[in-house]
Amino acid sequence: KIIRDRTRVLHLNGRPSWDSRFLREVLANNPKVDLLSFFILRTLGDDVVSPTSELSLIPFPTNLLFSDYLNSFDLIIFQNFRYDPFIDRRYLSNIKNFVEAGGAFLMIGGDLSFQQGGYERTPIEEVLPVRLQKRSPSFMDVEFKLEMEKQILHHPILRLEKDDDMNREIWQGLPAMNGVNAGLVPESGAHVLAGYRKDSSMIPVLVAGSMGKGRAVALATDSSWNWNFRRVGEGGSGRYYQKFWNNIIAWLTGDTETQLIQLETDKERYQEGDGALIKFKVLKDDYNPDPGRNVTLILQSAAGESREIPLQTDKNGEGSYEFIPAQEGFYKARVRVERGKEKTCRELSFGVFSETAEFDKPLVKDSLLKKIAEVTGGQYQVLNAGTDLNGYLFENPEVFEKTKTRVISLWDNWWAYGFIVGLLFIDWWVRRRSGLS
């Protein structure tokens, strides 16, 4: 069983802002996140009198981040970040390959993001769950509240509360946002989780989708920090802001609870003769339950024998299967779901163990204990309810403790002091003779 240790996140910020400040606080305080952040404090177009070398804390390590160590990260975040001139265009293909191989990518909006970040017709656009259209202005400074469809609230990113009604109330009560990136067209297969309704059209704001083996999210605003700052100012809590971002990280990195097929056993370890209960849940692409779905459960025994059991999900998209393992050892359970030509599987392992004779009959080995007592000069005696241990006296070994310490300083010795002064004098004399200053 493999458990993810920590999620490594590369966080690039186009400029310091309240939005980046609050998000970085969430990432830095998450014990599951190993964070590396870069803030762009100035651009080449800024009018300053000092040279770049004096204003940059360190040179931007483009090759190290996007070539040598790229695959060591789990998630890359571009927050209101324009890649030119900090990242050469050829490195954008590396990010695309990183996502296709199973990595995660998140782009957060602002006036330096999406179209205004220069990402049109680049490998980054191919990774995003949206297509970028040219329009003016591409960033609109408007105040709006997010809207979402009722059926999409089951998506893991939007689950701020487990109860459906309470979750809906929380979303309706969140403060308004300011500023939105326009001209984003959702890709086929991507899910528009939330949007901003302008007149009769819906502008997508939060879009999630898959790219190869990886996942990507586009958030077309840089004011999500309102859900923390303004909500606390209104007497509420910033808990839902933190929950929202932790949900995004969990979904992007493929957390177990965000899988469309969930598989578990009621125990991780069974005793021989116990019944093993395997439970599974199947969800649609929008994370609503998939009732009546045909499921194939494949069981592989410790001896390597496999058998397939056809099952079907109930109205909640759930199902279970119970059996008694034939022998001890490690077993594998795999659930396979077919949707058209697409096959999705989930697998887990569990162990079956039998109690050994050591635990069934914990007997004392008299001969071994007597031999130990003989070699060590001890005594062998069988304890019972009437045994009195107060009569046994054990000699205490001698213990030596340091009770006095004397410290002698080097300067208390005139010969050591004279030796050091002599060395300094000889060094000075040699330099004088050699003409050195």
Image (spheres, rainbow, N blue to C red):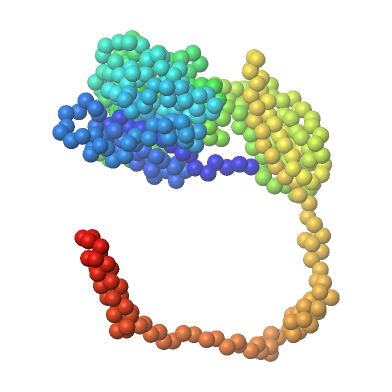
Q: Quadrant of residue 319?
A: top right
x 24%, y 66%: residue: 433
Question: Front-most of 23 and 257?
Answer: 23
| Closest to the observer, 48 or 278 | 48
Q: Left or right? Give the position of 309 relative to 245.
A: right
x and y percentages locating residue 225 in the rendered image: 31, 33
Seen at 29% across and 80% down, the residue is 418
**Quadrant of the image occupied by residue 228:** top left
Q: On the rendered structure, is 231 left or right of 210?
A: left
Q: Quadrant of the C terminus?
A: bottom left
Q: Residue 204 location, x and y as percent?
A: 38, 18
The image position of residue 219, as x and y in percent, is 37, 25
Q: Is residue 147 left or right of residue 73?
A: left
Q: Residue at x 53, y 35 (%)?
A: 255
**Quadrant location, the N terminus:** top right
Determine if residue 240 is in view.
no
